[in-house]
Amino acid sequence: MTALLLPLLAAIPVMAAAVTAILPSRQAGRLVALAVPAATAVAGLVLLVLHRSEPVIAASVGGFVPGVAIPFVSDSFAALMLVTTGVVALMSLVFCDQTGEFGRSRYFAPLALLLLAGANGALLTGDLFNLFVFVEVMLLPSYALIAMTGTWRRLGVGRLFVVINLLTSTLLLAGVGFVYGTAGSVNLAVLAGAAQEDGRVAAALGVVLMALCIKAGAVPVHGWLPRAYPGTSAGVMALFSALHTKVALYAVIRIWATAFDLDPAWGRVLLVVALVTALWGAVASASPVGAREILAWQMVSGVGVILAALAVAQAPGGAIVYMIHHMVTIGALVMLIGAAEHVYRSGQLAGLSGLWYRVRPLGVLLVLAIAALVGLPPTSGLTGKLEVVTAALGTGGAWGVATVVVVLVSSLIGLVAMLRLWRGIMWGGPAPRPGDDDGDSDERQQWVDEHGDDDDDDDNDVRPSPRVPARLLVPGGVLAALSVAIFLGYGAIAPEVDRAVAGLVDTDAYVSAVLDGPDAMTDSTIGGRS
């Protein structure tokens, strides 16, 4: 019975999108839009509990025999992703609500829900063609979300986003066709180990992985991400960072573990791409003058670290932990900086200067989020980096050492970029209030006379500026606190990660549940991490 509920995780957001599109009350639409990602996170938690006794749950949709029917499959890895996706998506939509995104268009809520429907479907599908379908379900509302949010720059970057993703989707569909032509199936359970047995299947799956890596923002086709994402609003950027790139990375991990059996021989090409991506993104993040542009380049670097942790190790535990950390941390940083950007109407470092003096709570939260991104305690960043380094050192050899060196160097460069971000937006004079272009204007002095100087530090009494409302800090603050909670409570999370890793390393339970029916593995258990 539980298996039959899996398709609902993709169907309910679609139905909710239809309801919100026709509801006359925008308030009701907002409530529905916030309830659906919350329900996704709760469903993921329920599945995590169920997978302690039932490692894999599968449902066949379409009335066909297993192997031919459309499979929806959940294991501990998928459940962990559902929980993280639901939480970050919920906080992103709460932030969008606070900044007025829902009020600007009655179609914002339906589009966001369609995006979530595509993400949920992609996380749960066990079929490459339906992976393509759900990825397209994610992309279609994304085009509209880019067009209706952000600055005027969105019009240009929107075209780039559309062109890149249309070409990549064509490549992905061609790859799926090649897989069917060489293997006779696009069902992942049928393809288990096929890449090691047949070079033609491996080449066909390589096309699929290439398309997914482009969608994730890996080098050399990566420049679209740091150009497109900052052109949207902060809330939509946080939503995209949690769904688009991470769903693509989830699919890469799933295919690599199932069809390639984590074969290190095939992993060398992926590892080279990953290491170059990690370094390139870190170096590029040290130069932009826009706060969210710096974070977008850090997203590219994080994609490289996740792919490197997958390609170099015999178990993808480091990749899973780091991906969860990255979703939470980037979401927190984007929304915290977006809160200041919403008030001061500037995304440039100079336009946000002096936040430490004016909005001390924001400064404290940014300390936590930046510490998490560079891998300092007490945040999930340290846990994620340790998992990646441990996995790389465990493999031994030159490739493992090279991975550790690149990860540490990219972290050091990322620290420099974050210090530059911190110095640019936190120190100096307080940020100007909107419309105050002349530092010595009579208008500014009148504002000081009317509102007073609330800056305790007279040395930094440069110009007046409004405070960032506390309500805008809540979504990013929740994710920053979650990063700390992951670090402090990792002992409770580690067993779930172990089960996720074990299910990816030993795919017998996955294959049996999909091909032999949903009741095949009810009495099975999976052990600890290999």
Image: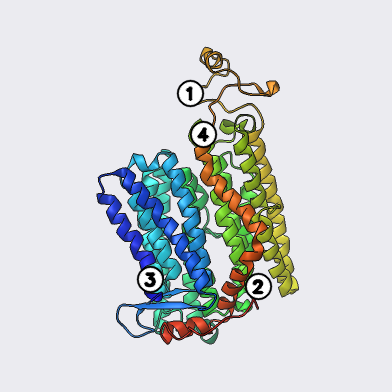
Do callouts 3 and 2 mark residues in contact (Cβ within 8 Å)? no
Residue at the location (44% across, 61% down)? 40
Find the distance from the CA under tag 1 to the CA under tag 2: 53 Å
Find the distance from the CA under tag 4 to the CA under tag 2: 45 Å
Amino acid type shown at disc 2: Ala
Answer left or right for 157 relative to 416. left
Q: Earlier in the sequence, mark 4 or mark 3?
A: 3
Judge the density around disc 4: few (<14), some (14-19), many (≥20) Cα neighbours within 10 Å. Answer: some
Judge the density around disc 2: few (<14), some (14-19), many (≥20) Cα neighbours within 10 Å. Answer: many
Amino acid type shown at disc 4: Pro
| Viewer can see residue 395 | yes
Quadrant hosting residue 71? bottom left
Q: Which residue is mark 2?
A: 313
Q: Position of residue 357 (x, y in %)?
A: 64, 29
Of the pair 374 and 229, the residue shown nearer to us: 374
Q: Which residue is mark 3?
A: 5
Of the pair 315 and 55, the residue shown nearer to us: 55
Give the mark toward the camera: 3 or 2.
3
Compared with 482, 191 (above or below) is below
Give the label on residue 469, or none: 4
